[in-house]
Amino acid sequence: MIKTKITEMFGIEHPVIQGGMHYVGFAEMASADANAGGLGIITGLTQKTPDDLAKEIAKCHEMTDKPFGVNLTFLPGFQEPDYPGYIKAIVEGGVKIVETAGRSPEAYMPDLKGAGIKVIHKCTSVRHSLKAEKIGCDAVSVDGFECGGHPGEDDIPNMILLPRAAEELSIPFVASGGMADGRSLIAAMALGAEGMNMGTRFIATEDAPVHQNVKEAIVNASELDTRLIMRSLTNTERVLNNSAVERLMEKANVPIVARNWRPILICGMLMASKVWQDMSSWNVEVSQIFPEYSLKSINRLERIFCSSLKWELYISSSLYAKYYFALRSLTAKKDFRRHNESGAKMGSRMVLFLLHI
């Protein structure tokens, strides 16, 4: 057993955290890690409602008497999740550790700290870590460029990032990104970390609710088998390479004609909202904006759209921001359907923006 500031802070035996992962961090995963002496994490937004999260927390309490936490990822979007409701479920469920990610959790810190909850925030840079310290986070998870998912935009690997964090931070931090075994833990601690946060490695465990083929692909992958996507959106993701990723990286050339601009506009809004919200929005939201299109037809349009583009969704960050806020302003109007003329103009520009031609 290794005792560090992190083990003492969270009341765990080993300085190993199973980070929050969408559709992986259920009670089974979190309790297994907790029972093994680490810190298991339930992924809050995987649960569709605060009530669902409350039930998952109760289930985890039945499976372990050890400490575990809940991940809350704060993301911008057309419609935010019920964060106050999720926090209420966490507090009432007796959870004393919350892992936050995405945007700054500053707005919710009074509720979390007022309930005696320890907050560890995931950061991809020293400057973000310092901001987390300033707003009252108890610890941070410093994510190097090696990490799966979102590694940030600075491209700084842990060999450089962790010593810099140790020089600047007063609160304890754990290392994340490329962590996989005891060697990773010792190396991270030598560079100043008080433990490590692992994600991908836990996907390959027996307790992860993931298909065996995916687990075997992770185990059999080499250091050359990941790709970085969505770089031009300033929303970089590191993913395991496969045929779908290869299609995403290809170029497309789709002609724009009078009969297809509106469906492309609709699909453009759908794709933009999904990228902006980290793939967490629902097609039903778009069908509500355009009631003349059924949910079934929206789903079909999305498949055709992505297929036609050969999954090429890259655009420049400046164009993305321009049209995201333009669309957001347009859809905020009381009666969106009255703005057909402006919508048509928006549509032709959105097409160019999406196809990058």
Image: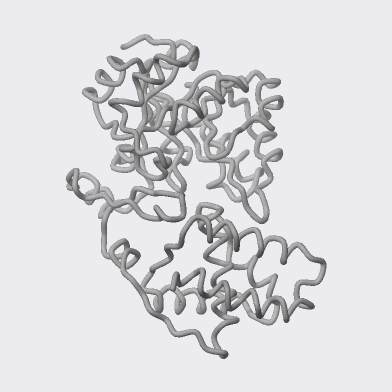
Residue 270 visible at all: yes
Q: Residue 230's quadrant in the figure?
A: bottom left
Q: Residue 168's quadrant in the figure?
A: top left
Image coloring type: one colour
Q: Looking at the picture, tell me which residue is in the foreground, 297 or 41.
A: 297
* Quarter of the figure with the C terminus: bottom left
Q: Position of residue 6 (x, y in %)?
A: 44, 15
- How many numbered marks does the figure carry? 0
* Quarter of the figure with the N terminus: top left
Q: Is residue 169 above or below residue 79?
A: above
Say left or right for 251 vs 334: left
**Residue reaching furthest right?**
334
Q: Position of residue 123 (x, y in %)?
A: 47, 31
Residue 36 visible at all: no
Q: Position of residue 179 (x, y in %)?
A: 29, 31
Q: Position of residue 164 (x, y in %)?
A: 38, 20
Say left or right for 288 vs 160: right
> Residue at (35%, 33%) from the top-left corner?
144
Say left or right for 51 vs 247: right
> Residue at (28%, 42%) from the top-left corner?
204
Q: Is residue 344 above or below residue 318?
A: below
> Residue at (42%, 63%) from the top-left corner?
314
